[in-house]
Amino acid sequence: MAADGVVYFSKMFQAVPHLAQVARALPGTFVSSRTSTLRAFQRLYPDLEVARYSKRFGFLVRGNRLLKDAGAIVTGSPYGSFLKPYAAKKGTVFHGTYMMLSKDALLRNSHFDLLCVIGPRMKGMLERFPEAERLNIVDTGFLPFCEYPERSAQQRAAVLQRLGLDPQRQTVLYTSSRRGFGSWQRAAEQLVNTAAPHFNLILRPHPSQSLTSRRADRDSFKRVRALIQARGNAFLDLSECALSEVLSVSDLVVSDANSPSEEALFYDIPQLMIETPECSRDVIRQIGEREAMHPDDLSQLLTLYDCGPNLYIGDQTPDFSTVLDRALTDQTAYAAQRERYFSWVFGSRDRMANERVARAIQTHLL
């Protein structure tokens, strides 16, 4: 690679959909130190170039040489100590929808030469801090929207049939938050057990579980697969599909009020929010206060829970037999709030963020 080339780097899978969209507009090589992340990248984006980084083998490894010679390194997480030795200019596109942005979070990203933010919420949060004045912040939009397919009957049928699901049935997507915080252990099996049989189900654990599973995760997936086999019309998605793909065929999203539930608003999909002792409106409020979020930002963040009905799961066994139908029936009552929340977080529904990021990289980093 020439010295003015671009390297896209991430250890975590979560940044892959963001970086892949930029790489399609501004060619470069995706580099990672994690085998699971590289494999997922190649599976989802086989047309893009990848290389491995190795701490052990140094410049004998292509990914190490690419980082050393890069003109620009673009990532989705701070990686401050990792990036420090490299001479290239550096930028971040963050990853996920970055629901919380405290002063400490800003400072962890202050070493970047370019910060590409996803919309009005993120830009407003940053501008609350005086330290942001010396940083190069560009509002480029949300990158994963670039790959969100246009919905159609033909597209829906093709995706659902490939997943072994019936295109004539309404489809419920359950997407939980990360291990130890999300509702997977409390809700996944019961969703398969009790959801009405007229629904397709897609169950998507967080990538921290599906791509880097531990024994407890693997045992859970085994139980869920057995239940799916007995039920039919359900699919366990261990990050085998792009989130954009499964959202595009969903009629209802069941979530922990997380980044995927925010992304689902691109299609204005009705929502059902799960609350648990580990992750609830009160828990998020406590975290936001501990992170010193501005009260206005925190208050607005909590209105995500107002985008659909809420189901609290404590020690009881949840029953989804009627709550899914009710969430679909009541969807129009939450439509205005879904639109308000989307506009605050993302601003625009266009699919052009990768081109704006590419221009920002060429202007500020190359």
Image (tube, helix red, strand yellow):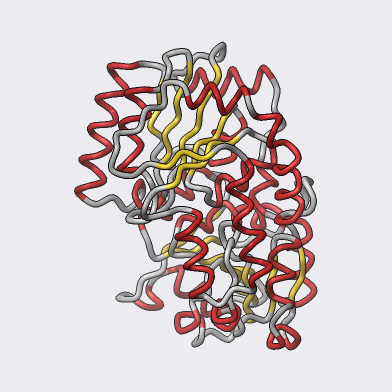
Residue drawn at x 67%, y 17% as measured from the top left:
153
Q: Is residue 325 above or below residue 54?
A: above
Q: Position of residue 329 (x, y in %)?
A: 62, 22
Residue drawn at x 65%, y 29% as measured from the top left:
331
Q: Is residue 354 visible?
A: no
Q: Is residue 131 above or below residue 207?
A: below
Left or right for 225, reference 326: left
The quadrant of the image that shows the N terminus is bottom right
Residue drawn at x 57%, y 66% as measured from the top left:
100
Q: Position of residue 48 (x, y in %)?
A: 57, 51
Q: Is residue 43 visible?
A: yes
Q: Position of residue 284 (x, y in %)?
A: 49, 61
**Which quarter of the picture shows residue 201?**
top left
The quadrant of the image that shows the C terminus is bottom right
Left or right for 11, reference 142: left
Residue toward you, 210 or 190: 190
